[in-house]
Image: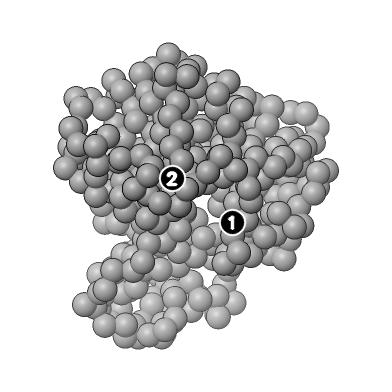
């Protein structure tokens, strides 16, 4: 069972201008970007598991996990995998961002926080999904907490941040599993998670197949002990709700907008000339979370918990179940 905690914002909404101090090749197709204050000022502490919006050339905004040590105020570190089928974010980071560049960053959000009361923690990272778990490992290792980190990858060429992980995580707690493209040769996730342990929490992040395997292996764990974060939207689950048009009412402005059957709420709003903060456009990051006032929502995101869904939605993917929906805009 997947636990979702309320997303926290640990920074004021106005973004920073940060400088790219270094870009390092960490693994095949993966670069790290070290961001610093251009005047040398300390950066705010962030919570392990947090992500940040990065404003890229061409008006692209994407969310990336903060992969560094949350207690290191001198820099923020991002790990970015070049995705050939991306919507342009990772390619812009790899091809257009250079050392010395100033980039706009913010706000910081955390939809993947660690529980503070766990007696033991199991971290499961697949590929680039290691980035939020790496920040968790920094915190757990520094505090002397009981934990284990399992890093799954195709081969050594795809293992990022290995030197830093070895320097941070005690050898007996760090487990690297290489499968050469065949999951059967890698970590036996079912065996690892077969027996739920008392006061143990599980965190996992990675590609689709890895996420599915972890979710299935941990489905019998107690509620609230399993936590995950998607980097890509899973294949959509077939819905019995027809993709019909509906009326969108913006309560504050008094406007009424028609949302077409093949149109997102955010696109319908933007066509009126309004700008809505967005990033992933897949229901993964929470950047476009908006409160709703009336109507029944067809939530299609992968980030809001039940408490949040009772009062807000993500305008990039959510739709109305009925004919009308009212937003606090």
Percent across and percent down for residue 15 are 65, 47
* Mark whose residue sits in front, 1 or 2: 2
Give 278 or 232, whichever is nearer the viewer: 232
Please state if 102 lies on the left or on the right of 242 as rendered.
right
Percent across and percent down for residue 292 are 35, 63
Question: Which residue does the image show at 24% across and 37% down from the upper left?
Answer: 191
What is the CA distance from the residue labelled 1 to the residue labelled 2?
30 Å
Q: Residue 119, relative to residue 30: is it above or below? A: above
Question: Which residue does the image show at 59% across and 59% down from the upper left?
Answer: 83
Residue of label 1: 62
Q: Secondary structure at mark 2?
A: loop
Give 311 or 174, whichever is nearer the viewer: 174
Figure disc tally: 2
Percent across and percent down for residue 238 are 26, 73
Residue of label 2: 179
Does the image show residue 55? yes
């Amino acid at each position: 069972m997947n636990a979702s905690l309320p997303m926290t914002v640990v920074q004021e909404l106005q973004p920073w201008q940060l400088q790219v101090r270094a870009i390092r090749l960490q693994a095949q197709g993966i670069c790290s970007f070290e961001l610093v204050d251009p005047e040398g000022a300390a950066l705010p502490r962030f919570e392990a598991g947090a992500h940040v919006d990065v404003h890229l050339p061409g008006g692209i905004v994407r969310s990336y996990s903060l992969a560094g040590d949350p207690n290191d105020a001198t820099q923020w570190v991002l790990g970015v995998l070049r995705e050939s089928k991306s919507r342009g974010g990772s390619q812009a980071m790899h091809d257009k961002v250079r050392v010395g560049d100033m980039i706009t960053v913010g706000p910081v959000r955390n939809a993947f926080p660690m529980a503070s009361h766990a007696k033991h923690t199991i971290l499961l990272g697949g590929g680039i999904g290691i980035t939020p778990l790496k920040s968790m490992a920094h915190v757990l290792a520094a505090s002397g907490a009981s934990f284990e980190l399992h890093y799954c990858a195709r081969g050594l060429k795809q293992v990022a941040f290995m030197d830093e992980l070895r320097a941070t995580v005690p050898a007996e707690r760090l487990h690297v599993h290489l499968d050469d493209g065949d999951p059967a040769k890698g970590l036996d996730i079912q065996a690892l998670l077969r027996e739920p342990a008392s006061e143990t929490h599980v965190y996992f992040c990675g590609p689709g197949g890895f996420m599915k395997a972890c979710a299935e292996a941990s489905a019998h764990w107690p509620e609230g002990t399993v936590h995950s974060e998607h980097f890509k939207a899973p294949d959509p689950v077939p819905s019995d709700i027809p993709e019909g048009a509906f009326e969108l009412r913006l309560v504050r402005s008094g406007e009424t907008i028609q949302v077409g059957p093949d149109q997102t709420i955010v696109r319908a709003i933007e066509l009126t000339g309004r700008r809505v903060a967005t990033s992933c456009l897949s229901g993964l990051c929470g950047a476009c979370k908006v409160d709703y006032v009336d109507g029944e929502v067809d939530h299609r995101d992968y980030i809001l918990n039940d408490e949040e869904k009772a009062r807000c939605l993500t305008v990039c993917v959510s739709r109305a179940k009925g004919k009308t929906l009212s937003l606090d805009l």
